[in-house]
Image (spheres, rainbow, N blue to C red):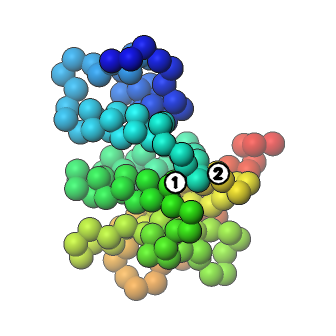
Amino acid sequence: MQNRRLCSAEANWAARTKNNKRGIVRKGATLLEVAHLDYFRYLCFMSKKRELYFFKDYFEKFYDDQTEKVQRKILWTLRIIEQVDRIPEVYLKHLKNTSGLYEIRVQVGNNIYRIFCFFDLDHLVVIGHGFQKKTQKTPKQEIKKAEQVKQEYYESKE
């Protein structure tokens, strides 16, 4: 393994999973953990159109509760958002009647998941919380929570 600095995504992942700062996978790591580290290494060496910022632990709580298959699809969708110049609405859609909120759209089989996000500057996508969608319309309490996360983010920047 190369002796190099980790990018921010790798460093965050390594810190959360108690890997050392050189990115060496700890003894006894699961295959999923190794796949996550490989994914973050991959992200560090490609040209990205956008940066993702996971605000607090809102996304992590949602992500950890999902199955491995759903987690892989979420990571794949996030990669699309980072890489693609013009993101198709099937993956990222602006929510009407909100103050700049978007939903990242993930579908695995018949299950539909939504992750709220918003833009800070032109290239920084701030990722908030997610939920499994069970009705046609996005529940108002989920939108309200996303608005609160957005407000909390901007207040923390001041």
Name the residue nearer the viewer: 61 or 10: 10
Q: Which residue is located at x 46 percent, y 84 percent?
A: 137
Q: From this view, report whether residue 15 is shown above or below residue 58.
A: above
Tell me the quarter of the picture where residue 78 sits.
bottom left
Q: Is residue 63 visible?
A: yes
Q: Quadrant of the N terminus?
A: top left
Kindly state the secondary structure of the residue where label 2 is placed.
strand
Query: In front here: 5 or 64?
Result: 5
Mark number, residue 126: none
Query: Visible in this render: residue 126?
Result: no
What residue is disc 1 on? 82
Residue plotted at (75% across, 43% down): 157
Residue 94 horizontal side relative to residue 71, left or right: right
Q: Nearer the viewer, mark 2 or mark 1?
A: 1
| Residue type, label 2 | Leu
Q: Which residue is more in the foreground, 42 or 56? A: 42
Q: Quadrant location of the C terminus?
A: top right
- Residue at (40% x, 39% y) in the render: 42
Identify the amino acid type marked 1: Glu
Q: Is residue 50 left or right of residue 35?
A: right
Give the distance between the C-alpha atoms of the residues marked 2 and 1, in whole angstroms.
9 Å
Residue at (42% x, 14% y) in the render: 3
Kind of element beneath mark 1: helix
Q: x%, y% of residue 58? A: 49, 49
On residue 124, the disc is 2
